[in-house]
Amino acid sequence: MILAAFLAVCGAWFGLANPVARLPLLMLLLPAGLAYLACRAETARQAAKWAYWTGALAAAGNLYWTCLPVHDFGGMPWVLATPVPVLMGLVLGAYAAALALAWRFGAARLPAWLFVPYAGAAWTVMEMLRGTLFTGFPWLTLAGAFSPWPMAIQGAAYLGAYGLSGLLAALAAAPAVYGLFSRPTLAVILIAAGLAFLGNRRLADPVPKIAAAHVTIVQGNVDQSRKWAPEAEEETVEKYIELSRGALSDAPSDLLIWPETSMPFFFQDGGHLAQRVRDFVASAGVPLVFGAPAYERTLGGHVLYNRAFLLAPDGVTAGYDKEHLVPFGEYVPLGQYLTFIGKLVEGVGDFKPGASAAPLRQGDLALGTLICYEAIFPELAQKRVEAGANVLVNISNDAWFGDTAAPRQHLDLALLRAVEQGRALIRGTNTGISAVIDPRGRVMAQGGLFTALALPCPETPIVSETTWYHRCYGLITWGLPALFVLLGLAACLRPVRSRDRRPGGLTL
């Protein structure tokens, strides 16, 4: 049991992006280890206990970086900041415990040909719940570990990231439950081979683009500790303009991308800094997407937004206000009651969520905008494409996390949105990792961390065709949980198999 838990934790640590070494295939040790613990533990209580601590350690290790923004920008001493990933792991471990109990219940009653899809559906439901409850935190998805391997994630175009995670979990759970040389394991090996064939076949097919755009991302690498200082505003504007001018002198571009809150002032108020940006865009003749805080006057005062602006050369602007805000970063949940809790990072105030998913349009481009954290939520990218987006744009600021695994993990999750929706994704960040990803999840251009740069991508595909996942989103979103419930009911109606016929001889 100890060995299984240890391998599962190490698999999670080294399967996802981390500062030491990475092999995505190792991530499968997590569902395999949880399945083994679920079915080999002597009692259900013991299974839940082992799974809980395995899931908690796996999550805490991968989220080690969460203590950095709390200390560096939230002003908390290390003695209070260090426990943050531990506390997050203790919460997330509950999902692993619940999964283990569900798997144990199903393995004791269902035949292998029903348990394997049941196991996959259970994992999918777990990730869906984790991405929804308590504002949602779909960060450590199983499918995200395989983002560096485009062949392995093409199933997201059919099942979505959660569904693909469930399929991968089922493939890993079968040999752990039934043994390496069992018939169920042989069956899942054939399924895995089919998945690989499908992935390679889809990668070989040309992207059905209607046009292509030359996109240039400008990564300013502005020091987060000085970003909101009034004396640094002019320096920041000048830096972005000069980097953009240099890039445009090398090659013309159809679109410039500056990161989330790259302009640390209220652009809508005008003023000389806003005019400098307008003059630059007019002279360059290139539309610009950039982030800046915004506000709306109400009877009660001002409502603040985290906004993405699209500024056209003729001076016309459009905007998108961030819909899914970061709790304790951009707002305090139940802040009217928890007045003693402040935001953990500095900014201009507490933001309010926007309400529109409409794309920002310029010529042939319909830009579905995802600001920072929003790129990890499949339902938000779905809404953007449903509203007509033919390209996804993710502007972000990962400077909070320093030189850790977080920017890489964030990029891995954003990459899944491109595959799910069959859209190119342009990701512009302040300090990295900026990238352009094609609709198959292949990185077309990528910058480094903590360096100022201009990143061109001359052939960014513009696509109108939608994926099977997009077209059948409702069926998948509700169908996979329904499958879990139906198979769970089937297990309830079946008697517990005799002990010698249960996987691993488990007892209940």
Image: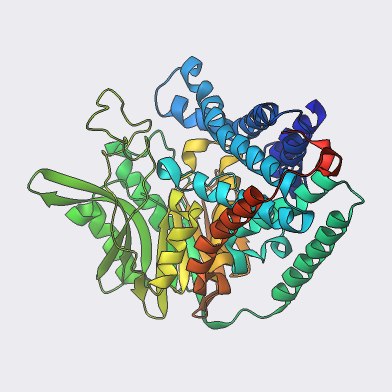
Q: How many marks?
A: 0
In the picture as drawn, the residue positioned furthest to the left comes out as 299
Which residue is at a point 44% across and 53% down the rendered structure image?
Answer: 374
In the picture as drawn, the residue positioned furthest to the bottom comes out as 210
Residue nearer the viewer, 148 or 507: 507
Q: Is residue 343 above or below residue 424?
A: above
In the picture as drawn, the residue positioned furthest to the top comes out as 79
**Residue 17 % position (x, y):** 66, 43
- Residue 102, quarter of the rendered image: top right
**Residue 441 % position (x, y):** 63, 64
Q: Is residue 211 visible?
A: yes
Which residue is at a point 25% across and 56% down the rendered structure image?
Answer: 274
**Residue 40 % position (x, y):** 79, 34
Residue nearer the viewer, 56 or 442: 56
Q: Looking at the figure, which quarter contains the N terminus?
A: top right
- Residue 147, quarter of the rendered image: bottom right
Q: Is residue 258 visible?
A: no
Q: How is the image coloured?
A: rainbow
Q: Looking at the figure, which quarter contains the C terminus?
A: top right
Q: Is residue 398 left or right of residue 238?
A: right
Which residue is at a point 34% across and 64% down the rendered structure image?
Answer: 357
**Residue 122 % position (x, y):** 62, 50
Q: Is residue 416 left or right of residue 244?
A: right
